[in-house]
Image: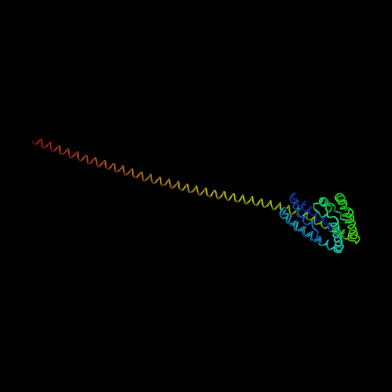
Amino acid sequence: MLRFKSSIFIMLLVIADCAHASDQTQQHLAAVNKKCLSQQWPNEVSKVDCLNAVEATVIKKDIPFSLKPYKKLASKRRILAQQHDKEIYSVQAAWNQYLQGIKEATEILDAQEPKLVDKKSALSKDIVAANPAAACQSQILITHLNCTDAITRPIWKRDAPDTVNIYDAFHQKRLQLAQDFDNGGAFKIITAADKRYSEGINLAKNEFFSDVLHAQFDATKAQEQHNQMVVEQMQTQLEADIAHDNMLIAQAQAKMDAAQAEAQNSQATENNESQVSDDDIANLLVQGIAQGLIIVGSRSGTAGLNNETAYLRGQGR
């Protein structure tokens, strides 16, 4: 019903403001809600089901920490809508009769003024641009109709003056339909149901405020704990990397020390081997010299003996 649109739209604003949503998120919510609010629904529950489905998608994507509180809100909103539909069930037949009367009167008007259904006509374009139904949001049906008439009639008089009397007859017809609807006690029943519905929505709204604030606090705390854990993990990994690097350095130093010790041992061995060879050579040289002197001496002695023998022989002569 027309009367219940404002309650749902207010809830849209509550969700966006309470969740501290960005302008972009509010635009997303407004866009998806428009799909639901622009349709005619047989009851409030059907409309709420549409809203719950499209809003949950936006909230899950844009403000995920609010998803759990939103689901709680959506559930309560649906229960309130069910209660509301149950309360106005007794006047549903009267409401359907009103809608049927408006539909028939509109069909007659369209047939009598073709410009109204011609999307290219000035009459049609100007009425669509003015959007009287959206501009008039009174909870009283007759007041709402008079509000739309105050917007539509001047446009009609300017763009289609020849059929303004036909429009006036249409307006009087719908006023009579609205009067019949209200005289049946429907207005009082709906007003009471609206009041209870609005009060329930307000309670759900306040609880949603509280739940979102707690959810935001929990999300912030969880993020801080996660950040701390990441820092600790990074510190642990850094210490492990340093220990590993130190181990590699120690291993490399040990290999270098071992290689250096081995090189020193090899050098000492070579030096020892070189020293032994020199001594041997010296000994050999000493021995060789000694042997040479003996040989030389022997030869010298033999020569002297021979000389002496030759001398003695000469004396004997």
Vertical comparison of 228 with 80: above or below: above
In the picture, the quarter occupied by the C terminus is top left
Of residues 303 and 129, the one nearer the viewer is: 129
Q: Is residue 202 rendered to the left or right of residue 255?
A: right
Q: Quadrant of residue 196?
A: bottom right
Query: Can you give x and y, in whole percent of width and height, for residue 95 in the image?
Result: 86, 61
Query: Can you give x and y, in whole percent of width and height, for residue 156 in the image?
Result: 86, 51
Vertical comparison of 190 with 265: above or below: below
How many numbered markers are drawn?
A: 0
Q: Is residue 293 rendered to the left or right of residue 9?
A: left
Vertical comparison of 264 with 114: above or below: above
Query: Can you give x and y, in whole percent of width and height, for residue 110 in the image?
Result: 84, 57
In the picture, the quarter occupied by the N terminus is bottom right
Of residues 69 and 105, the one nearer the viewer is: 105
Of residues 40 and 270, the one nearer the viewer is: 40
Specify how the rendered protein is coloured: rainbow
Query: Can you give x and y, in whole percent of width and height, for residue 151 in the image?
Result: 86, 51
Residue sitting farthest toward the right: 183
Of residues 9 and 130, the one nearer the viewer is: 130
